[in-house]
Each structure stands twice: as structure tokens, then as C-alpha cells.
Image (cartoon, rainbow, N blue to C red):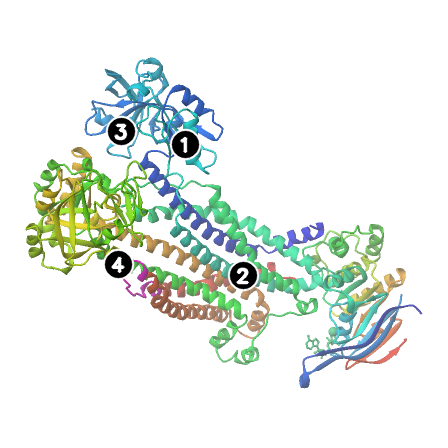
Amino acid sequence: MNCILKASGLKKYYGKNDTVVKALDGVDLEIEEGKFTAIIGTSGSGKSTLLNMFGGLDTPTSGSIKIGETELGGLGKEEAAAFRRRQIGFVFQNYNLIPVLTVWENIVFPISLDNRKPDKDFIMKIVTMLGLEHRLDSLPGNLSGGQQQRVAIARALASKPAILLADEPTGNLDSKSSNDVIGLLKMTGSEFHQTIVMITHNPEIAQMADRIVQIEDGKIKSVSTP
Amino acid sequence: MNKMLKTLAGRSFAASRMRNLIAALAIALTALLFASVTTMTVGAMQSMNLTMQMQKGSRSDGDFRNMNREQFEQLQAVDWIREAGLRMPVSFLENAKRHNVEFDVLDEVQAELTFCMPQYGSVPEAADEVVASDQAIRALGAEPEIGAQIVIAFTVHGKAYELPMKVSGYYETSNSQLSVMWTGTAFRDAYPDIFRYTYDRDGEMAGTYYSDIMVKSADGLKERMEELSRTLGGNPDDMKAANYLPAVVNRMTNPAPDAGVIVITVLFAALFMFCGYLLIYNVFDIAVMQEIRRYGLYRTIGMGGRHVRKLLNCQVLWLSALGIPIGLLFGYVTGRTALPYIMEIFADEYHTLLVSVTPSPLIFAAAALLTVLTVWVSTRKPVKKAVEIPPIEAFRYVEKSTGRRSARKSAFGASLARLAWSNLGRNKRRSAFILISLALCMILLNCAGIIADSVDVEKQASWMIRTDFAVVNLVSTNNMEGFKRREEALKKETIADIAAQPGVREGTAIYKNTMDDTDVTYSFSHVEALLAEPHDESGIGSNMIETPEADSLSILWDENGIVFGLGEDKRPICNVYGMEEAALTRMDLREGECDAHTLYQKMENGEGVLVGVPLNRNDMTYYEVFDLTEIGETISVYKDGQLIKELPVLAKAGINGDDEEIGFTCAGPLRVGHDGLFLYLPAGVYQEIYDDPVIYKYSFNMEEDKRADMETWLADYMENVDVSIDYLSAQSARESAFAMRRMIRFVGGLIGVIFGFAGVLNLVNMVITTILTRRHEFATMQSIGMTQRQLTKMMVLESLYYAAGACILGMTGAVILAFTLVRGIVQTQWFLSFRFTLLPAAAVMPVLFVTAFIVPVAALRTFYHDSIVEQLRIAG
Ligand SMILES: Nc1ncnc2c1ncn2[C@@H]1O[C@H](COP(=O)(O)OP(=O)(O)OP(=O)(O)O)[C@@H](O)[C@H]1O
Ligand SMILES: [Mg+2]
């Protein structure tokens, strides 16, 4: 097995002394390359905290995260940002598209920030697969929620990240759109051999993953394969 | 910059019009402030400069005189001279009445430099065409109009000429005694006889070349000009030499910058910078806070802090590019409008005051630079906030709420007032800035009001003049001249004419010694010690300078820097006045014999003299360094080196501007006796001592109902009978004090209003932001039964709280500052006497409350109806 992400002894405490909140309390986890992992758990169990930590958006109180060969704790602020736009793809519950940019611009935005040329063929392939090819010049405001989330997925995939992190990507969608989005996510994942880590509340969706990690009170309760 | 970043910056910019408008307005307002203050400063300096140049009759850098043709041609070829005018003096006209008219050949460069260009008509082309001042044309018996026919009469090289000429153009005169009539080089070519060069043989001016020059750089100008004079074969120093070729720097063109003006400018710049900071900081802080989620989003998808900074700086740059030019333009207009009010305070000192400001690049460059600096400083903190906020925090960022937040929810049912109150503390710094800018408006207005009210009109007027009227020679009202020569004396006929007017009372003529009276000198213990110091056989000591310039006396000075003008026997000539008893009665006798009548009689009997000591205008006490004698001490009077009198000091008086010369200037005494002593004698004794006693001033009171008539009569008399005189009246002295008061009110009011505007803009911005960011909250409130009316009421209340806070802060600040800083300033200025008022601050209060009411009502009308709410929807 090829391990792309390795977290060891991850702790994240908020507050001090008696009011301390242990959002994460000693998490050890390995994510296998090319696999689709689902994280489940009750509200407040620490799922988002863990995912943000993976993406370098937040720093742990103690413990370490290694993605590929890179130790996240060893990166400076600007390096972390650069690492994020090259190696991490994020998909959020509320899409997080830039409203003033068109669909196409949104998708290539992280690549353009690096002054890199977007791989047009590759991106068009994703776009077509996600059914966005006729929407490239629209503004996000004019798209439905499902379409917006598909744009967010395209953006996350466009830079060929080492890992794609999704925090309840279907949380704002009805069940039909949810199924579409997850189906597409899984399909593109296997097509491009993309590692995906996704948080979900929906047990049905979790069943579509290769592996299910359950978190409770900041600790890993179980790891299973459906 | 990265192309995508540029696209993003551009689109975001275009997407938030309202916010950009406010931000650009804030920047524009700041630029306006700076542009107006730089315009006023540069304008004031330019105007003073131009006024003084006008008085001098040239705005050149300097001039050369008495050249022959070859010398002039060589001069024109000198590389450091940018422009050289041509002036060939012919003569004064013999047939001009009551006005001196100098007739010259000029070229346009020279005419331009010496203020002789025609304002009406055109420059002379033909040999019989002339341009002159309106007054010169009248003096020749014609009306100033283009095409008027005149005859000019003059004598040169011993030959009399009488030539008919035609007026091709004319200009309005700036000097009532002397003006220039000029013709072009065609005249020179037509009359070669007139322009034969014979100066080196007989000193005839006609035929010589004069030239006013403009140079490329004024560094070391005096030395360079004198050097050139020598190179041309001239002698720049010796007046009596046949090759005398004076090279004179125009001191009016290249004066040292005035320290006072610079201090005031820096002060205002700092104040405006603060005002701009309050405003711009708030606008950007609000903008960043509104967008902070967006920055979080940018960060999560891989934008670095560097990118965010670039993005924001780019928008700041565009806003500046939008706001600054507009602000500069309006600021320039404001400054220009205000300038005449400011210049009015100089109006009495300079008779023909010219107010001028040209839109020099300096004004705009300085103002733009200051604005950019302010914008940069004010935006650093908000930008830093946006850059440094950790992405995950920005992402979940909600405007910080106070501990009262929960209370607010429960209080909803209780009262709108409490609801509004609890909103105030949402952002402390921002609220503080709104309060401060509104309060500063009140405070500044009030400070200006107090200073304006403190202008002590009577003190100022009584310092300038002790009687209702005083008539002097024109030189006495010109602070660059002063009364210093016998020929500048008042004419006996003029005094008689004035005295014969109905209503004139207590008219007294005052005699004064001049630089021509160097045969009479004085000695007293203070100078005896100075004179006892070692000196060479010609009588010059180490503390003396012998005749440094042609038009001045040798001087002697003491350890305090008090300077005495010396006479022929190297003793001080002092400033000596001869007067009648009525004039002495008006003086401020302080020590010794203080009864004016007894004193006058004793002095008439030759028993002694009255010594005047200049007063410090701040506290009206003696300046100690000028207090050089003791009561009872003897002052010895010498004439032609012989002791003729011994006069004990009988009394001492505190003297003011009127006692020294007249009102605003003491330029004359400063050049004659210099700093002392000031001796006052009865007219009879004065006439006994001086061979050729002259009168410099005629002071008189007027019956009250005749004062206005006197002003008109004098104005007419000055213009038509004796053009050499000028006068000061108590009324005009008061006018100038009132002008100063008006100026302070105007400038202070302007600044106060600008701060008020900044405060209101802050308030508008706050209200709009509140409405936009809290739409959800409002919608929720409305959905649970709050009406639009109640919503409006809540916002109005919130806004009124700001107004009330600003009033309390402003009133307190105004009172505190009044009794500290303002009183301090008032005490340093002699013409001010502290007078407290709270009226300006109080007057602002209702305005503030009305504004605070209108702003939220109007804002809610504009931004809070559904369709627009929809349009303005903020993403995310
Ligand atoms: N910035 C913070 N300050 C204090 N406590 C925090 C902060 N962020 C998260 N927490 C706490 O950490 C715990 C874990 O939060 P997290 O957002 O990871 O939960 P979650 O599993 O994603 O829940 P949900 O399913 O509701 O999204 C929660 O108890 C939360 O209150
Ligand atoms: Mg979560």
C-alpha cells in the first residue's frame, strides 16, 4: 500500500485550563493513495478540524502531518499557501466560488496564481465529465447549487493535487443533486486516480467510499471498509 | 502583477460601487484638504512676493545698469542668464503734472519683467507709439484710451525735445508717484541723436543700456553678477567711477522662506493628515471587514498573504487615482477662494496688495504626495489585518460582538433604544473614530471662534495710532522704506490745508531727525562704555561697522545686539522727535515727571529730555534691552563734535508704533537712530538743536461726525494735490483688526466644516455598512414582527447616540482646549486678549443632530428596499 498522507499524534485544543475544548485528541491516520475515504461522526466531533489540518489551513497543537514527502509543520506561511494551491484541492459545503470570476476563471484561478499555464486538455476533460462545458462563461451566481459544487470540484481537480479534501460537499444540496455530485466525484477520482478525503453526515454516501473513518470526541472510533 | 489577480482586482473593484464611491470620496476629501492648504501657502507666498516686486517695480532676479552697447550685447550672450531685457532710459518728462513719468525705450522682455505691459491695447510698434500707466497719461492731460494723442517734453544731451506721440496701450498704475512711459526700439532708431553714449564723459543717462535679467539658478547670484560687471569692464562698487556698472540682485524675487508660514503649514498638514487618517482608516477597515470571508476563501484555495496584499494595494491605487485628482482640483479652487481673505490681513501693510496664485505643479505635487502618504499610512492596518488573518478564522469570521450580544436578543422586546445602544460597541475603534472626527469639528470651530473673538481690536488700533488720523509721507507706510531723509518731509502747505478742514482738533506736527542730520549726536553712559573700547585712528572700534552700504550709516552695537546709527563724530545720532504739548500729553509717561504739562515746561526751559522705551506688546512692559538710561542720568548733545547741551533724563515713556513712526512700520527709525535712544523734545528745543528741522507726521483728532468726510477729503487730496502723502486713521486700523478676525473665522470655519464633513462621511459609511451587513438580522427582526418604521427608528437612535456622544466629547474638548492650548496661543500674540466662548460649538450641535437624523433615514430609503437588497447581495 502507498500512503499519501500520514497524521500522527494530532491534537488540537481550543481555550485554556477548565474551559479547554479538545477538538482533536490524539489522531493517528494514514490515507492510501488513489483511494476514496469518507469521514463520518456526530456534529462537533472534530471532523472539520481534522480536514482543515490536512489542508494546512490550521495548525495542530501537537502532532505532525506529512503529505507525500512534505512535512506540513515545516512550511512557512507563504510556502503553505503555495503548497495548498499546488498539492491540495478543497471542496466546501458552500462552494466558495469567487462571484466576480466566470466558471472558467474560477477553475484555473489557483493555477494562474502560480503563473503556470493551465493544462487545457486535461481541464476540458474534467469540465466535460462534470457537464460544465456550456457554462464556462457564466458567473457562479447564475448557476444552481449542484452546478456550483461541480465547478468547485473542477477547480479542486484542475491543479492535479496530491489530495482532494471535501467538507460536506453535498450539505447544501437536495438528495438528487447530492447523488449526482458524489457520483461525479467518485468517477473523476477513479478516472484520474485521485486521492479523496470527504466528510459526510449521510451514511448512504459514506457507503460509496473505499474506506470509512468514524470520529468521536476528537478520537478515531473505527475504521472500516463497506 | 499576475494577470488573474489583476482580473480579480478589477472585477471586485467594479462590483462594489457604493463602497468605492465612499472610499474615493474619503481620499478626495483628504486631497482637497492638502491641496487647499498648499494652495493657500504657495499663494500667500506668491502674493507677498509679487506685491513686494510690484513695490520694487521689477520681478527680475537682478539688473545691470549704465552699460554701453557692446557691454549689453556681451551680457545677452552670457550662458547663465536666461532672459535679459532691454531698457534705454531717456529722461523724466518735463510736462507731466503731479506725477513723475520716466520715459524709456523698452523691449517686451523688459516690459514684462517690470510690470509695464499694456493691460489694454498693444505694445508700441511705430516710433511715435507709447505705452504708459493711466496716471501718466492723465498727468499729460489726456484720457487713458487707445489712440490718445499726447505731447512729451524732455531734455537730453542739452537739447530740448517736444514730440507728439500716440498711446498704443496702457496699464493701471500701481505707484501713485512714479510710473514708466515706454516706446519700442523703433523710436531709438528714429532718434539716434538722443541715444549717443556719453555717460563715461558727462554722466548722461540717455544712450546707456539697462537690463533686468532672469537667471537659470540663483546660487551665488550677487558674486556672479559683480564678477560679470567686472568682466564687462565695469566697476560694480564705486559710484563715482566713470565705468560705474552696478549689478544689483533683486531681493524681492529671491527672499528667504518665512518661518512662520512654514510652521503653520506643517501644523495644518499634520492636522489634515490626522483627519484623513480617521476617515480613510475607517472606510478601509469597514471594507476589509466586510470582505474578510472572501479573503479567507481566497486563502483556502491557495492565495498567499502576498497575493492578498497585492490585490488590496491595487484597489487602493485605483481609488487614489480616482480620488486624488478630483480632490486636488476642488482643493485648489477652495484654496484660491480662501486666499483673498488670508491676504486681507496684509492689506494695510502693503498698499497695492496683489493676490495671485498660479496653478504651479508644486502645489499639486506636494498635496498629492501628502495624500498618498496619508492613504498609505491609513490603509496599512486594514490591509495587514486582511493579510494576516489565518484563513480558517477569516472563513468563520463574524463581526466581533460585545458581551451584550445575548442581552440584545432578550432586550428586543424591551426597547428599541437599548437595542440601538447595544449596537454601538460592535467595533470600538471605528465608533471612536466617528466620535472623534465629529467632535473635532466642534472643537476646531470653537477654538477658531475663541481666537477670532480674542482679536483685540482696540488694543491693536491704539498701538497703531493714538489719534484719529495721522498723515505722513508715503515712505512711512511702506515697511521697506520708512522716513529717513529730509526730502521726505511733509510739506507745510499740506499741513496747512489739512488744518484748515472743518472739524480738525488737536492737530500737531511732529519733527524727526533723519539720516541727513549726522551733525547732531548724543552720548550717554551706556554708549560711552562702548565707545571707550579700542579703536583705530579713523575712530572705528571693534564693535563698529563703517558705512556698509551706500544708503546707510555706520553702526555701533552693544553686547545685547542693540544697534546705534552713528553720526559724523562716531557718536549715536538717535531717533529724536520734536513735538507740541498736545502730542506729549497723548504719550504713555511711566517714570520720573509724569505730569505732561510740567514735563513739557521743564523741557522747554532746557532742563532735560523725555526718553522713550519700546514696549513689549504682549504685556505692555519695557523691553529691557532697550531700557538704556536711568532717570536723572545726563545725555550730552553734540553738534559738529562740540558739546552744546547737557540734558538730564526727566521722564521715561513706554512707546508704541505711533510714537516710533506710524502704526504698522518703524522702518524709518530703524535706519536712522536704529535701536536707540528715542528722545522726545518740545518743538522749540528741537528747532534750536537742528539746523534744518523737518516734519514727518501730522497727527490730529476729528469731530466724530466729520471723520468720514475727512477720509474722503484725504483720499481725494492724496490723488490730486499732494501725491507724496499717505495716512492712517483709527478707523482703518480697526478695519485691519476686523479683517484679521474675519480671516481667522473663515479659515477656522473652513477647517471645522471639513472635519465635520469627514465625520458625517464616516457616519454615512457606518450606517450604510450596518444596513448592508445586518440585512439578515434586520430581515429576521422584521420576520418576527418589527416594522420598517421601528427599524428606521432604531437606526436613527443609533446615529443620534453618536451625535450625542460627539457633542459631549466636543463640548468637553472645546472647554479643556480653550483654557489650555488656545489660551496659550492667545497669550503669545500681542493683538489677542483671551475671551472665552462656546457659541461656535453650541451652534454645531443642532446641525449635528439633524444630520444624524437624516443620514439613516435617507440610507434606509436608498438601500433597504427589497429589489435593491437583492441587487446588493453580498456573496458567501
Ligand atoms: N475556533 C474555535 N474555537 C473554539 N472551539 C472551536 C473552534 N473551532 C472548532 N471548535 C470546537 O471544536 C470542536 C470540533 O469542531 P468541528 O468543527 O471540527 O466539528 P465537526 O465535526 O466538523 O462538526 P459539524 O459536523 O457540526 O461540522 C467543536 O466542539 C467546536 O465547538
Ligand atoms: Mg464541520
- Spatial distance from mark 2 to mark 3, Cα to Cα? 57 Å
The kind of residue tagged 1 is Glu
Q: Can residue B795 be seen by looking at this rendering?
A: yes
Q: Nearer the viewer, residue B73 or B846?
A: B73
Please state the chain letter of the residue tagged with numbered disc 3 in the rendered image: B
Tell me whether circle 1 and circle 3 mark residues in contact (CB < 8 Å): no
The kind of residue tagged 2 is Tyr
Please state the chain letter of the residue tagged with numbered disc 2 in the rendered image: B
Q: Which mark is residue B281?
A: 2
Q: Which residue is mark 1?
A: B226
The kind of residue tagged 4 is Glu
Q: Answer above or below: position of A17 versus B710.
A: below
Q: Which mark is residue B624?
A: 4
Estimate the x, y position of residue B201 in percent, counting from the top left: 30, 19
Do dots 1 and 3 share one subunit?
Answer: yes
- Spatial distance from mark 4 to mark 1, Cα to Cα? 42 Å
Q: Where, quadrant-wise, is the C terminus of chain A in this rendering? A: bottom right
